[in-house]
Amino acid sequence: MIQRQLYIYFVLVTSMVLNLFQLSAPPVVKETRALSEKPHSALIQGSAALKVPSVHPVVAPLVSKPAPVKEKYNIDIVMDYDRHFLTVEEVITYPNRTSTSLDSLTLAVAPNLVPDCFDLVRLAVNSIPVTDYKLNKQRLDIPLASPLKPGAAVQLTVRYTLSLPYLNQSSNIDAPLFGYTDMQANLINWYAFVVPFADGKWTLHDPWWYGDYLVYPKADYTVDLLFVGKESAPVVAASGSAEKIVDITRYILQDGRAFALSISPKFQVSTMKAGSTTVSSYYLPAFRKPAEAAMQVSAQAIILFSKQFGEYPRSTYSIVQAGLNDSRAFSGLSFISRNFYKTDATPANNLTYASVRAAAHQWWSDQVGNDPATEPWLDESLSTYSEMSYFENIHPDVLSKWQANRVDFFRPQGKINTAIYKNTTHDAYKQAVYLNGMYFLSDLRKRVGEHAFDNFLRDYYQQGQGKIMTGNDFFRILNQHTKIDYSDLVSKYFNPQ
């Protein structure tokens, strides 16, 4: 603890000295407040790096030790909010749980797709610096000095800086979420992570102009965030639970897939309980009433889905008002379109629809993973079905209105097992995967019976927790719960494989 405190004050004093001498720093586009993250071993402004002792002790090589059951990410972040600039150091423990010896590792580095955003400062494997890596767009390939055998583990250290992009969302509500606006800063897909290894290759798809393309493995996260340059830190919404350690805030997320943060000095926060889960709503001033309505809807959905599909395992869940078209979910945190907060108080509105859908993705995406680029129907169709289930159970009086407004109005069509790259437009993608997929699940429930279908979904959730499921897994588990023929439904809704 004493060593960490000395480190914190060293960083703070250094920051003041650097400011005093006006060392080069990224230009301030606009004064905003930024995301929260954890203390890093170097505060980097512009291209100048100040070397300081590592926050985490040097760990001996892990190659000969038994591998843990999942990846572990210790991430230290020092953030200058007004400059929209972060220094990040990750210590990644990667276990080889495959049956193959690995000669290299592949990491996803999504910020490198943004111009002038990502700068890799240092890379090491088992504390030994690596210089012969390859960084191409979002792909970082790291060779290993010796093969990583099945059952062994390796430790990566990745140090880099992020200059957050400004997002002009006043004219484009569907702008990317990663970056900062006049209202807040959002960190999504912001850190480097080892992508899944399956069928003899690393799973890292190309990005597309709609839909998700990253496949997230299950991992444990410890993220320490330190703000510099301001006397008071902004309000932070984060995946995982928070603990204050002097000037650092530590966030713990276990069995997570995607750690996200949203930060604003303007955020107000309301909270309530949903069973053992604390639901928090982060919103801008003047939106307290709809924000608390969204919080209550989210709490209702968590309680309902816990009974229907299986227990929600996290102690926290946060919803954040943000600039996007609908909703977007990460581990324990979801973003909801700020436009939906300008709504009436009835349950039949877009704020309710989006809040329920975002909560459903905590089951169908976060807990039960899938490949959202090649089989997006596995989480999107189930999330739309979960919306229908919410209205069937909580607001049956407006179920028909939800069906008419949210689904039938768009006249869904198209095969549902379509990759994000195969549809001609975003609307065609949503009609097929989101909406026609819900028709399939509804028809399937009618065919096999509600009891068998409900048992199937609970079993699918239980078997899929922490895993990356496929369509084959879906039907394999379904066939364990029914002997009724549904092949005509498969022919109707699916492309032949």
Image (tube, helix red, strand yellow):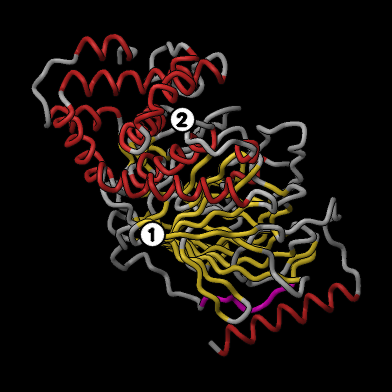
Residue 377 placement (x, y as % from top left): 38, 27
User: Which residue is label 2 attached to?
Assistant: 373
* Residue 31, placed above or below residue 406: below
What residue sits 63% from the left and 72% below the top? 41
The amino acid sitting under disc 1 is Thr
Mark 2, Cα crowd under 10 Å, few <14 / some 14-19 / many 20+, is many
Residue 140 among those drawn in magenta: no
- Looking at the picture, how far across and down is residue 145, in whole percent? 46, 57
Instruction: Residue under label 1, please give it.
Output: 277
Residue sitting nearer the eye, 303 or 102:
303
Left/right placement of residue 111 relative to residue 437 reads: right
Instruction: Give the label on residue 28, or none.
Output: none
Q: Relative to 154, is 156 on the left or the right?
A: right
User: In which quarter of the view is residue 206 placed?
Assistant: top right
Can residue 375 be spotted in the picture?
no
Residue located 51% across and 73% down the image: 243
Query: Principal SS element in the magenta part?
Result: loop
Please say whether residue 55 is one of the residues in the magenta stretch: yes
Disc on the earlier residue, 2 or 1: 1
Task: Name the residue at the left extreme.
Answer: 483
Image quadrant occupied by the C terminus? top left
Residue 326's image quarter? top right
Foreground pick, 180 / 222: 180
Residue at position x 77%, y 79% in the image:
14
137 vs 96, left or right, is right
Cα separation between marks 2 and 1: 30 Å
Q: Secondary structure at mark 1?
A: strand
Q: Position of residue 201 (x, y in %)?
A: 39, 37
Q: Nearer the viewer, residue 278 or 260?
A: 278
Residue span colored magenta: 50-56
